[in-house]
Amino acid sequence: MKVAFQTLGCRVNVYDSEAMIEMFKKDGYELVDFNESADVYVINTCTVTNMGDKKSRQYISRAKRKNPQATVAVVGCYSQVSKEDVMEIPGVDVILGSRNKSDIVYHVNQARAEKRQIVEVTDKLILNSKFEDLGVTGYEGKTRAFLKIQDGCNRFCTYCIIPYARGGLSSKNPEKVLDEIRKLSEEGYTEVILSGIHIASYGHDLQEKWDLLDLLDQIEDIDGIRRVRIGSIEPMFFKEGRMDRIVKLTKLCPHFHLSLQSGSDRTLQRMNRRYTAGDFEEVVAELRQKMPDVSITTDVIVGFPGESEEEFQETFDFLGRLNLTKVHTFKYSQRKGTPAYQMKDQVSGEIKDIRSKQIMTQSNEKETVFLESYLGKSLMVLYEEGKGGIHFGYSANYLKIRVESNEDIQGKYLETKIVGLNEDYLIGEFI
Ligand code: SF4
């Protein structure tokens, strides 16, 4: 039996798909490309924008066109938020919500055998803080392993559907997280990436309260693990008295993706973000002062409802002053079911385009300056898979480095001198 996957949306969805693929393989399924004819198609959907919904529907029709006899399973955020809509799409056999993925193989096999539609979507997900442990981590090459340690969010930013689509904050049991990291270390992994939807709140839902920092402290003691990265995180995590403990961690990589969203306090307030631009700036300054070589990247949304020319300019000037390594720009997209959908003064697509281009151009310039500052310096690089004598790896602060070598250097940490740069990576040589 053949199964094909299509995954939309965020990194967390990618991990969930990897876990589900493993479950199908264990049941004897062979994984094939989504464009091939398969017996089962799984579409792990996204609903973060209306475009996510549209794309999810397109993949469902594409699967049915490829093999009209196939079983089609639609899982994840779109099925969670719009279960009824998905049920009405012709040819959908299995519909599973955001926290109903662990029994996917059982449901698919049952739908095939009984030739009926199966719907398993936990209602009122926002009140549900049970972590659905899919038990498998995602791997990138043979050097880095991803661990989803948390799901859902209780923050309710006004533009975001996630609390409704993925439910409330739910954290993976810390002992299980630590056990999995120990196992990864025994298998030879030296770098782990902790990720989730809102990892800054990790552990706050657990009976015995934990904090992400407690987890990071414990990982310090796991032999074999040399680097720990954390996914996108809210700037305020670095406040609340944590900074001094954070800078003592020897394994935590000095690369942070701090979500800013706007450099204007008025916009941030309408977004229901719980910090000011000043708070963000303080965190950046402190990190730079206490962590040499720290690299800070961020996300910005342009064209949020009511974003005036003046507010946008505040964001633009703020970013101009901060000199971050990279700014990922998103054009605000109206999402039904969120408070911002109803807000007045929606910004036109044309203005969003202009603003987004301005931020991107600024970001590219800043990135080049940051990369150029490494010319002539040396960095410790963990090398990943290479082909034909060309290898790529990453420094602790997440700079991508290319070297030429005929040796097998995969999984090795090697001191590398930076001798040049390309558009999005540095060129290195061994010292
Ligand atoms: S913090 Fe805000 S933007 Fe992030 S997932 Fe939660 S609600 Fe969405």
Image (cartoon, grey):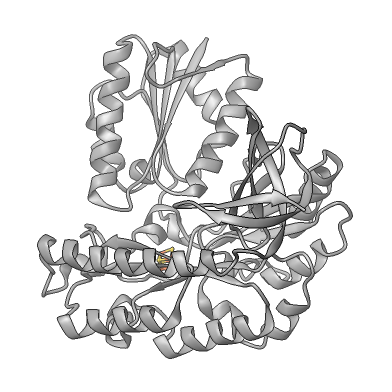
Residue at 32 percent of width and 25 percent of height: 92
Residue 283 falls left or right of residue 210? left
Vertical side of 256 occupied by 60: above or below? above
Q: Quadrant of residue 403?
A: top right
Between 289 and 427, the one nearer to me in the picture: 427
Name the residue nearer the viewer: 404 or 299.
404
User: Picture coordinates of residue 230 (x, y %)?
Assistant: 62, 61
- Compared with 376, 388 (above or below) is above
Residue 398 sits above or below residue 315 on the image: above
Q: Residue 159: in sight, yes or no?
A: no
Q: Quadrant of ligand 1?
A: bottom left
Where is residue 331 drawn, in percent x and y?
Answer: 25, 61
Which one is nearer the viewer's eye here, 389 or 393?
389
The residue shown at (88%, 63%) is 221
Residue 237 figure quarter: bottom right
Pick the residue in front: 47 or 417: 417
Q: Quadrant of residue 63?
A: top left
Asked if residue 208 lies left or right of residue 157, the reply is right
- Tell me if residue 268 can be seen: yes
Q: How many marks?
A: 0
> Which residue appears at 65% of the width and 67% of the height?
203
Counting from the top left corner in percent of width and height, residue 362 is at: 33, 70
